Amino acid sequence: MPTFSPFSWLQGASPAPQCRTGLSCKPSLDEAVRDVVNQVGRRGEADLALVFVSTGYASDLPRLLPMLQNGLRAKHWFGCAGGGVVGTNADGNASELEQGPALSVTLMCLPGADIQTSVLSTDQLPDLDGASIDWQDWVGIRPDASRSQIVLIDPSCRGINDLISGLDYAYPEAEKIGGIAAPHNAPHGSLLVDQNVVTGAAVCSIGGDWLFDTVVAQGCRPIGPVFAIEQVQRNVLLELNDGTTTSSPVACLQRVLADLSEPERELVRHSLFLGIERRNLQLPTAGVQPKDSAFLIRNLIGVDPNNGAVAVAERVRAGQNVQFHLREAEASRQEALALLNQHLGEVEEPIRFGLLMACLGRGQGLFGSPDGDVNLGRSVMPDLPVAGAFCNGEIGPVAGTTHLHGYTACWGLLRYAPISGSSNQ
């Protein structure tokens, strides 16, 4: 595992990389902004400011960015409203603030980075059967300038899955992380870009000598064997095969249940999901070998007692492998730790910053105590500056393809990875 020394980076002088963070839960937005500005400090202009704010301040969102920009300087401002906020205060303490008002601000100086933002009106998307350049022109960012993308989507947006597929189509080598912002009753959107509150979708592209690696923890563990789909109609599974027997999905599940403990059977009542195998068809990028396959976790949405068929919240096809999964706190901990440790073992450069987009169903509701995902991240990356939001759906890749998730913790791990021939240090 590479040596991680955050303080030498945090306190470096320009033009060295810097990260300044602030987190406040003051009851009024004006107080929270003053608190955060004091924590972050008024030193120089940053390349990127990430801003995450709870919906407790929803009615004041149009005032937020102008007030922050009155005290802080950054070339690009990007963020959203969340159902909760993840942030790091000036003392380096990272927290998940799930209830009440909260404001998280991170200013980063990233020498050699190419940062661009784009606001997308999603009323009419380019054609997925058309040329990829149509999507690139629509977004307004060149593929060779985009190594990673933060993708934030307003909850009023339609066609979210088509949007995510289109971004993958246009930028196949750019890893994407993000989420759906939290809804509120105020008469404006939930996305924060430059000086504005907007709807639709927004992309913050990271290029040049920096990139975000992604780690997607889906919070489940497999139960029973892997089944192959024998018969299916769109998203309705009709027959599964475990290598020896072909049966209805309900009959297969009954065999799985017979081998579970009583506590596990109780979990099945409200925490049963289906994993659908996805295979990575992309070539390796940035010197990191992609994982060949992984299970994409999806909700089970219906059962037909007449024929034992099961409907799943994802289109599937005959020949794909599936496996039943249980969601529970300990499985979520172990999976997240294993994935983070695995990733750190695959990269040589230290992780500089962690962007955490987590489901509203995680947090204390899953782990039974505060700061569950933050503590997991810091157990393998001590003192890592962390920021993000609790989302209504999280965006991240599984086996090389970006998906919209539920119940996940999607990590974006920022590292310096200079392009060959770059003179930046």
Image (cartoon, rainbow, N blue to C red):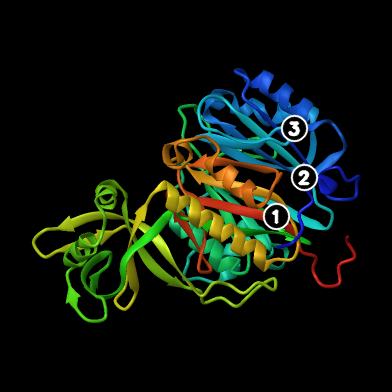
**Label 1, label 2: how many angstroms apart (C-alpha)?**
11 Å
Q: Are marks 1 and 2 in contact (CB under 8 Å)?
A: yes
Left or right, 202 with respect to 208, comes to: left
Q: Residue at x 50, y 71 (%)?
A: 130
Residue 399: where, in percent of width, then height? 50, 69
Count neighbours of disc 1 (C-alpha within 10 A) and say few if under 14, some if 14 to 19, many if 20 or more: many
Determine whether the residue tagged by mark 3 lies in a helix, strand or loop.
loop
Of the residues tagged 2 and 3, which is closer to the observer?
3
**Residue nearer the viewer, 337 or 135:** 337
Which residue is the site of mark 3? 91
Q: Residue at x 64, y 41 (%)?
A: 387
Which residue is the site of mark 2? 108
- Name the quadrant of the N terminus: bottom right
**Residue nearer the viewer, 257 or 113:** 257
Is residue 195 among what the camera can see? no
Determine whether the residue tagged by mark 2 lies in a helix, strand or loop.
strand
Instruction: Look at label 2 and name its amino acid.
Output: Met
Determine whether 51 is above or below 310 in the image.
above
Residue 329: where, in percent of width, then height? 43, 46
Q: Quadrant of residue 207?
A: bottom right
Q: Are marks 2 and 3 in contact (CB under 8 Å)?
A: no
- Count of numbered circles in the view: 3
Which residue is the site of mark 1? 414
In the image as oriented, which residue stretches furthest toward the bottom? 244
- Name the quadrant of the C terminus: bottom right
Label 1 vs 2, first from the N-terminus: 2
Count neighbours of disc 3 (C-alpha within 10 A) and say few if under 14, some if 14 to 19, many if 20 or more: few
Instruction: Look at label 3 and name its amino acid.
Output: Asp
Instruction: Look at label 1 and name its amino acid.
Output: Leu
